[in-house]
Amino acid sequence: MVVGASGTGKTTFINTLCESEVISHKVSDNPETAHIEEGIRIKPVNVELDEDGMRIGLTIVDTPGFGQNIDNEYAFQEIVGFLERQYDDILAEESRIKRNPRFRDNRVHALLYFIAPGHSLREMDIELMRRLSPRVNVIPVIGKSDSMTPDERALFKKRVMEDIEHYGIAVYNFPFDVEEDDEDTIADNSDLRKLMPFAIVGSEDEVNIQGQLVRARTYPWGAVEVMDPRHSDFSRLRSALLNTHLTDLKEITHDFLYENYRTEKLSRTVHSDYADAPIPGDELANQSVKLKEEQLRREEEKLREIELKVQREIQEKRQELQAKEESLRNLESRLAAQGEA
Ligand SMILES: Nc1nc2c(ncn2[C@@H]2O[C@H](COP(=O)(O)OP(=O)(O)OP(=O)(O)O)[C@@H](O)[C@H]2O)c(=O)[nH]1
Ligand SMILES: [Mg+2]
């Protein structure tokens, strides 16, 4: 999935990655139907790509860019809502007695967050990345990075990562374990980590450079080649996404992000109580959780009764003790009075 401010090069990136125009830049030609498309603007597209001789089935989700200085809450909710709906579908499928053989897992395994070249992260980028990161592997990228000089690019990358750390945004950071992973994995992952945020250049045109057709952007002074690592981090990002880190992204999505969502959702359903109408498909999962909750409640009640009983006994014993102390004091004072007499 690609997300970010309007005009940062998201659609161009997708078409560059797929090496064909899988997504058109035009939203609608027809003003009469333009409003209808509003609601279905987040629309997955299935493509097949060739990566090192391997066919990869990829689902791509383009999102409309949001604007600056306007209220983007609706767009933000739409994106987070889309991510959560894919989790809801899995949750419903998992709790079905008879599984649907044609079920499609449409969870988003990686979200490329497009940052516009500039001096630092904008407030809306910080806010949205923060909201997205508990639900999806967020990979920050700088779009249209050919508009920066190498020095500007290095400085901007540094600032962005400082902000991400400062605001505690849990982006996907090519995790590795120094104790457990082999040297190659550690080296590869730390190299990728150092490249973050990936500087992207996209192009929908193929240009003849020294007899070879390559994807590039041409300028009066020369060409910026998409796949050239000196010009952009595109090829590193591409191979991480489609090859080296595909499994890791999927595992984190399933074992961690989805699992957290599931736990949150199920505990929310229990607490919001039985009066709420159950969402279809979630019913079975809800029922078993409710049964467990009921059992726990009964055990809690039993424990509370025992506690009360023990407290009562302690109180009684304390009173007995006080009475005994009182009579002892009486006896002592009487003895003392007799002694004096
Ligand atoms: N210089 C430069 N221009 C780019 C690059 N990628 C895209 N563009 C241009 O930027 C403009 C916007 O690109 P899009 O890909 O449509 O941007 P988007 O993020 O999809 O925009 P929205 O769909 O409106 O959010 C187009 O004119 C592209 O040709 C890039 O890497 N470098
Ligand atoms: Mg677009």
Image (spheres, rainbow, N blue to C red):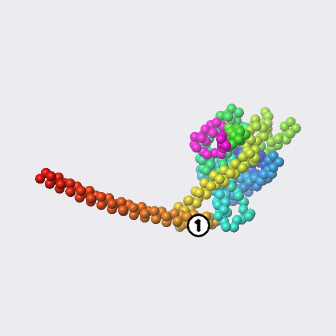
Taking 95 as reference, is 330 left or right? Answer: left
User: Of residues 272 and 270, which is closer to you in this image?
Assistant: 270
Magenta span has 283? no
- Measured as percent of width and height from the top left, residue 248 is found at 70, 48
What residue appears at the point 69 percent right and 59 percent down from the top-left corner?
Answer: 36
Q: Tell which residue pokes out farthest to the top in this image.
A: 151
Q: Quadrant of residue 233?
A: top right
Q: Residues within 10 Å of mark 1 (few under 14, many from 20)?
A: few
- Measured as percent of width and height from the top left, residue 235 is found at 76, 41
Q: Quadrant of residue 167?
A: top right
What residue appears at the point 32 percent right and 58 percent down from the top-left corner?
Answer: 318
User: Of residues 185 and 273, which is closer to you in this image?
Assistant: 185
What residue appears at the point 38 percent right and 60 percent down from the top-left corner?
Answer: 311
Residue position for label 1: 287
User: Of residues 84 and 306, which is closer to you in this image?
Assistant: 306
Task: Magenta stretch: give its range.
Answer: 157-180
What residue appears at the point 33 percent right and 60 percent down from the top-left corner?
Answer: 317
